[in-house]
Amino acid sequence: GAVVSQHPSWVICKSGTSVKIECRSLDFQATTMFWYRQFPKQSLMLMATSNEGSKATYEQGVEKDKFLINHASLTLSTLTVTSAHPEDSSFYICSGYPNYGYTFGSGTRLTVV
Amino acid sequence: KQEVTQIPAALSVPEGENLVLNCSFTDSAIYNLQWFRQDPGKGLTSLLLIQSSQREQTSGRLNASLDKSSGRSTLYIAASQPGDSATYLCAVMLTGGSEKLVFGKGTKLTVNP
């Protein structure tokens, strides 16, 4: 089946620094990938849709200058959390849509101290 | 705005019991509905996907039904096992070609040996 590889699985960073999360589609080409965020005991919330070769589409309330998305190839999308703050600590997860069902990465636990 | 609700929020059962997880959504204009499993701190594993034109899907001990007109889906787990312990998430894909998923908060299932 389709596989999405996400790295790192966890990261701890200091306030004010930036963190990059990578999401790769291993066996399919992803013109579109999706980035979600999940706070404890909450639903996964869509943050943005990354589009290969063009700008990402951000959901309402998500700061595009803070959460930079790059989708430069059909197999790689990256999310960079810039100037991270403790309130950005969350579980970030990406997904692709190879056929008609979603495939998710394993997620990244970000802790900002 | 599409909202997805899952009941119950948590469920604890003895091993071997059959159980039903419920999912409801407010807007029946969906493209499909998908059930996922999430283990603590992990990504999502797709369990079953039901297209809007379908009534149910089965995979092993799992059976998912969809009643689009009433905005409901159920996930039936037969002969539950301790390894089934996880959080089960229901998500609907919106129509209109956006491929966006709207998630419920999940049902945390514990199957006791």
Image (cartoon, coloured by chain):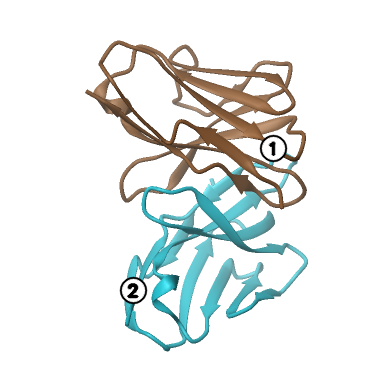
Chain colours: A brown, B cyan
Is residue A79 visible to us here?
yes
The answer to whether residue A13 is above or below residue A23 is above
Is B43 left or right of A41, judged from the image as shown? right
Q: Residue at x 26, y 17 (%)?
A: A14
Measured as percent of width and height from the top left, residue A79 is found at 51, 22
Residue at image position (25%, 15%) is A15
Residue B51 falls in image quadrant:
bottom right
Vertical relation: A34 (above or below) B49: above
Residue placed most toward the observer, B90 or B16: B16
Label 1 chain ID: A
Quarter of the figure that contains the C terminus of chain A: top left
- B73 lies left or right of A97: left
Where disc 2 sits, the SS reads strand
Query: Camera-side residue: B104 or A32?
Result: A32
Mark carried by residue A26? 1
State the residue in front, B95 or A51.
Answer: A51
Residue neighbourhood size for the residue with mark 1, other residues' Cα within 10 Å, grouped as few (<14), some (14–19), many (≥20): few
**Label 2 sits on residue:** B11
Which amino acid, mark 1? Leu
User: Quick check: B5 above or below B73?
Assistant: above
B100 or B80, nearer to the observer? B80
Q: Check chain identity for marks 2 and 1: say if they share one.
A: no
* Side of B50 where A12 appears, left or right: left
Based on the displayed image, in which of its 4 quarters is residue B85 positioned?
bottom left
Q: Residue at x 40, y 13 (%)?
A: A82
Find the distance from the CA under tag 2 to the CA under tag 1.
35 Å
Q: Amino acid at mark 2?
A: Leu
Q: Which dot, 2 or 1, sits closer to the camera?
A: 1
Residue A25 % position (x, y): 67, 35
Residue B67 image position (x, y, % from top left): 64, 72
Q: Residue pushed farthest left?
A: A113
